[in-house]
Image: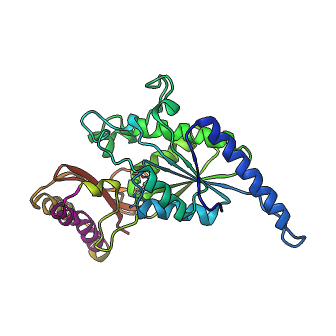
Amino acid sequence: MTSSPIIIRSVDELRQSVSSALERAQEQAHQQATEEQPAAPVTLGYVATMGALHEGHATLIRRAREQNDVVVVSVFVNPLQFGPGEDYEKYPRTLESDVQVAQEAGADIVFAPDNDQMYPSGTPLITVSSGKLGNLFEGKTRPGHFDGALTVVNKFFNILKSGARHHVVNAYFGRKDAQQVSLIQRMVQDFNHDIVIKPVPIVRADDGLALSSRNQYLSAEDRERALVLSRTLAMLREQQITRGLTEDDISAARERIDAVEGVRLDYLDVIDSETFEPPAADSSKVLALVAAYVGQTRLIDNMELN
Ligand code: AMP
């Protein structure tokens, strides 16, 4: 583990740094190897972020640190995944403190490209289509969001893998963005990416609010109002565990959220987390998804119900 992370701005440099960091780590592993304990192949851990790093991101980075020899964190506010009228311009950009958080959590390399590095010919001609799943829930309210997110993740995967070559690459994604995790897992399958996806549980504040870079948009009053999201999800989980959920419970949950002043529900649905379809009676992975506007800020959350 390096003491302070290298900050890299260009794609070519990233490839080279990843390649040499892995080589160095492998050499070190060989030097420390004994006859009883031969050197294991070294691995790369990767965390993709849009910056404004908080404890949720730090948890992903720490997980990557624990499980890998070299850790890369990308910080890039990807214009492709923001729709017209969304918060692309005002999205917090705090690279200096992000590097600090990444360092404390154990990153070796912070990749912070600008738009020209990621999209040298402007809007890319060839993009990833997120298909049917990409048009549901988040994708319904934010058309094109997942195509944009998958397109940039696809590029990051290609860049990292070309630097890491035969080394295993583990990529860590938060379950806070449950639909994104599923779509990335599908992309890896459908595009034969040689990358292992490691989902990480949601990190919450003590009062239950899911941590998000967008929480900093909330006034103190809005932050209090936002608690209705996690509390309603917890109520649904309680109902599911104690007696099984009914349609009426789900409707009541929607009403409970909409009843809070300053909060406007976008969607609240209960799905099978493998298919994102309504759960079958015997579904073992039932997930409640919620999105709502709290003041002007759009927040999402989700909770496994069983
Ligand atoms: P973002 O910077 O919002 O694009 O998030 C980067 C990564 O951090 C994504 O994989 C998110 O799912 C993950 N993440 C963000 N907030 C949390 C959280 N509260 N708990 C777990 N993972 C999170």
Q: Residue furthest bottom?
A: 242
Report the colour scheme.
Answer: rainbow
**Residue 109 seen anywhere in this rendered image of the structure:** yes
Quarter of the image where the N terminus is located: bottom right
State left or right for residue 127 relative to residue 8. Answer: left
Say which residue appears at 47% left-offset and 25% top-offset: 124
Q: Residue furthest right?
A: 35
Give, as a single range, the part of the protein colored magenta: 218-240
Q: Is residue 234 magenta?
A: yes
Quarter of the image where the C terminus is located: bottom left
Instruction: Point out the quarter of the image occupied by ligand 1.
Output: bottom left
Instruction: Give the image location of residue 181, x and y in percent.
Output: 46, 51
State left or right for residue 210 relative to residue 129. Answer: left
Front residue of this view, candidates 133 and 176:
176
**Residue 167 seen anywhere in this rendered image of the structure:** no
Say which residue appears at 29% left-offset and 66% top-offset: 209
Q: Is residue 150 magenta?
A: no
Instruction: Give the image location of residue 304, x and y in percent.
Output: 37, 65
Front residue of this view, candidates 160 and 228:
160
State left or right for residue 146 relative to residue 264. Answer: right
Count of numbered circles in the view: 0
Instruction: Give the image location of residue 155, x and y in percent.
Output: 55, 36
User: Would you identify the image quadrant in which residue 4 lies?
Assistant: bottom right
Say which residue appears at 40% left-offset and 34% top-offset: 80
Rendered view: 115 above or below 228: above
Rendered view: 124 above or below 80: above
Instruction: Give the image location of residue 50, x and y in percent.
Output: 42, 47
Front residue of this view, candidates 12 and 94:
94
The chief SS type of the magenta part is: helix
User: Would you identify the image quadrant in which residue 283 lies?
Assistant: bottom left
